[in-house]
Image: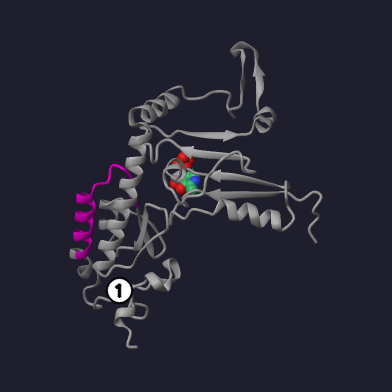
Amino acid sequence: MVDFDTFVILLLFLAGTTVKGAIDDLDRIIRTLEKCGFRDRFYIHCDGALAGLMMPFIKQAPKVTFKKPIGSVSVSGHKFMGCPVPCGVVITRLEHVKVLSTDIEYLSSRDATIMGSRNGHAPMFLWYTLNKKGYRGIRKEVQKCLRNAHHLANRLREAGVSAYLNELSSTVVFERPHDEAFVHKWQLACEGSIAHVVVMPNVSVEKLNNFVEELIGERPRWHEGGGFRVPCVAKDIGQENCLCGVHDKKLRVV
Ligand SMILES: Cc1ncc(COP(=O)(O)O)c(C=O)c1O
């Protein structure tokens, strides 16, 4: 039995999961928690490492705001924003900041960092990037990323490569290339049977086309001898997105 007086849930709401780029439905999570009787006995951290800075520019994306019962939000500066050093921002409620921070006499301020020190360049990089691109510039880049991600997913599917693009995401997931040199050359992140491309503002349509052409050109060679068969990735990206001999609708006799 759960003791509802003391039970606290720590939830991680991912704004763009690492491998498949999924975006959780924040409002639904909150509704479900409240419906199940948890009310104020939960804590939600919104992990927006990749997509946190893209979501405000995507109409259908969940609105992340402290008007909702969330505890904290984090975003990375070196991902979508392209800052040249690893950096990020965590925003939380004052009540939590107060618990974690202490007054530092010689700084005449409060400090909430683990080591009592921080990188002074990181906020400058972030401030510079945000100001240089501006609201409209960032919106344009978000739209470009989503458009290009759709382009990549469509081109892969047209070429017979199983591919999946999560709603509101710019992370294209597809069958893992069977050649480590190719994976290394294109710096593909792989997990099990799948690989992904995170389409960021620096990735052009031309680069995506080159990638697809090279993949299609090389692919049959990786299976020489055994005969080429499209690998099944249904368990990773769903039957409806898998183009293997068993799941491809075009190949199935109705
Ligand atoms: C969902 C998610 N959270 C956190 C991280 C880690 O972010 P950082 O590189 O800023 O430590 C990643 C990195 O890929 C991620 O995808």
**Vertical arrangement, residue 73 with respect to residue 193, above or below:** above
Is residue 152 shown above or below 222? above
Give whichever of 65, 52 is nearer the camera. Answer: 65
Taking 244 as reference, is 61 left or right?
A: right
Amino acid found under the numbered disc labelled 1 = Val
Determine the residue positioned at 46% across, 22% down: 120
Specify the farthest residue to the front.
Answer: 59
Q: Residue at x 22, y 55 (%)?
A: 211
Q: Which of 185 and 194 is in front in this view?
A: 194
**Does residue 21 appear left or right of residue 72 in this picture?**
left
Decide whether residue 145 is among the magenta residues.
no
First to last magenta residue range: 198-216
According to the picture, the residue beneath numbered tag 1 turns out to be: 230
* Element at label 1: loop
Where in the figure is residue 215, as x and y percent of width and height? 23, 61
The spot of residue 108 in percent (x, y) is 61, 12
On the question of residue 94 being in view, the answer is yes
